[in-house]
Image (cartoon, rainbow, N blue to C red):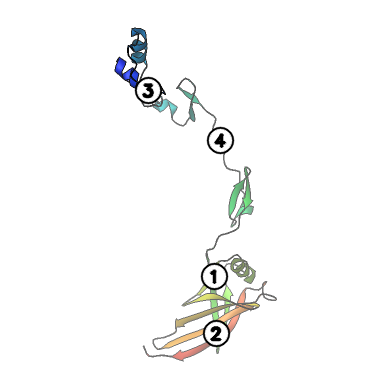
Amino acid sequence: MGTTSEELKKLYAKLGGKDPKVAGFSAPGEILNAINEIPLPTEYELPTVTTEDAGDVLVVNDEGKWDKGEAGGGLPEVTTDDNGDILQVVNGAWAKAEPGVGIAVYTGQTETSGNYITVTLDNNKKNRDIYNDVSSGKIVFIKTGGAIYSCVLAGNFIRFSNSYAISGTEVRVGSVSFNTSTGLDGNTLGGYNVSLTTQV
């Protein structure tokens, strides 16, 4: 802001004065001095911290100085009963969360008799585990030796189809499946493979 009568006249007009051309307008020296003594705003700065403050939670008080604050509480405890679960904190306590869409991969051992194939799941997994993953929206695969089976839902069955090379010129294609009504407690999937000869 200026300190002359002319600047004050302009301010008077901006503030709604009807006649900016006030003929003998003058500002007393006390007003001009008071205007000049108004401190200009400076950029706000946080108080200085030192290495002694390491690890503390600090808050700025009304005087612009640091005070020690209270740290928030830690995460709730979990136990081995929570293994394999997806957890989220709700009202300060752990709660089970729904899994998002993802991929689940199972491993298994293959036995073949003629064109019939049986896949036995590893790691004490049950067909019920697969069913739960499929029901939650996951994309499920079973890996057995040289084959990878991908999941397809078919009525009351969860069917896994595959194609993989047996030798240099033979490709075996087919599927294994289990019945979701009767086979959830088992750990084997059965089905038929068809051997095809192809040009390599």
Say what secondary structure mark 3 lies in.
helix
Give percent across and percent down for residue 186.
Answer: 65, 73
Q: Nearer the viewer, residue 197 or 22?
A: 22
Q: Of the residues under marks 2 and 1, which one precedes in the sequence?
A: 2
Q: Position of residue 175 (x, y in %)?
A: 55, 82
Q: Which mark is residue 13?
A: 3
Q: Are marks 1 and 3 in contact (CB under 8 Å)?
A: no
Reading the image, the residue beneath label 4 is 72
| Disc 2 crowd, CA 10 A, few/some/many (<14, 14-19, 20+) | few
In the rendering, at what x and y percent does residue 152 appear?
Answer: 56, 76
Tag nearer the camera, 1 or 3: 3
| Label 4 secondary element | loop
Callout 4 touching callout 1 (CB < 8 Å) = no
Query: How far is disc 2 from disc 3 in space, using C-alphas?
Result: 99 Å
Marks 3/4: CA–CA distance? 55 Å
| Distance between the alpha carbons at the discs numbered 2 and 1 | 22 Å
Q: Which residue is mark 2?
A: 112
Residue displayed at 56% across by 70% down: 122
Q: Nearer the viewer, residue 177 or 2?
A: 2
Disc 3 residue crowd, few under 14, some 14–19, many 20+, Cα 10 Å: some
Mark 4 nearby-residue class (10 Å; few <14, some 14–19, many ≥20): few
Residue at 60% across, 81% down: 190
Under mark 1, the amino acid is Val
- For marks 1 and 3, give the CA distance: 77 Å
* Residue hosting label 1: 140
